[in-house]
Image: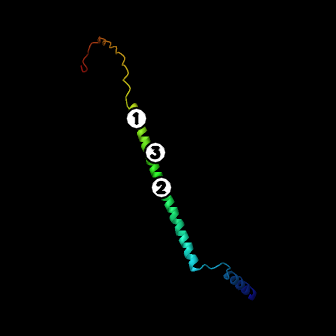
Amino acid sequence: MKHWILFIALIFGSLACSKEKKLTLEELREQEITKRVNQFIENRQEECYQNTMESAISMADSLLKINAVKYVEDSLQRPPLPVKPEKNIKPTPKDTVDNKPFLE
């Protein structure tokens, strides 16, 4: 039992002594400044990209609208109505059946 406790204490002790270099306050400040500058640059690039895309889309849309107006003017004219065929009206035949009263 004592061996296990000693073994576990030895493992925790070795893990507690990390060999990583502890950062000083100046290094932490530099890292934070670098991080914020990079974040600012990324945000500005994204904003510039969005603005460029909006202007390009509006230019493309205006060109499409101009071309659409040119072609719509030509296609809005309706074709002439087709010629209707003549109607041959035949006279109704004369009724030869005598009328009888419905109720007698």
Q: Residues within 10 Å of mark 2 (few under 14, many from 20)?
A: few
Residue 32 screen position, x and y as percent: 54, 72
**Which residue lies at the image location 42% right of the left edge and 44% below the top edge?**
62
Mark 3–mark 1 distance (CA, rounded to whole Å): 18 Å
Which amino acid, mark 2? Gln
Q: Are marks 1 and 2 in contact (CB under 8 Å)?
A: no
Q: Are marks 3 and 2 in contact (CB under 8 Å)?
A: no
Q: Is residue 84 above or below residue 55?
A: above
Which amino acid, mark 3? Ala
Is tag 1's residue or tag 2's residue first in the polypeptide sequence? Answer: 2
Query: Which residue is the site of mark 3?
Result: 60
Is tag 3's residue or tag 1's residue first in the polypeptide sequence? Answer: 3
Position of 102 with respect to 75 (left or right) is left
Q: In this orientation, which residue lies closer to the viewer: 96 or 91?
A: 91
* Image quadrant in which the C terminus is located: top left
Q: Is residue 88 above or below residue 34?
A: above
Q: Does dot 3 land on a helix, a strand or a loop?
A: helix
* Image quadrant in which the N terminus is located: bottom right
Q: Does dot 1 land on a helix, a strand or a loop?
A: helix
Residue 18 screen position, x and y as percent: 67, 80
Mark 1–mark 2 distance (CA, rounded to whole Å): 32 Å
Query: Which residue is the site of mark 2?
Result: 50
**Which residue lies at the image location 51% right of the left edge and 59% below the top edge?**
45
**Which residue lies at the image location 56% right of the left edge and 78% below the top edge?**
26
Which amino acid, mark 1? Val
Q: Which mark is residue 72?
A: 1
Mark 3–mark 2 distance (CA, rounded to whole Å): 15 Å
Q: Which mark is residue 81?
A: none
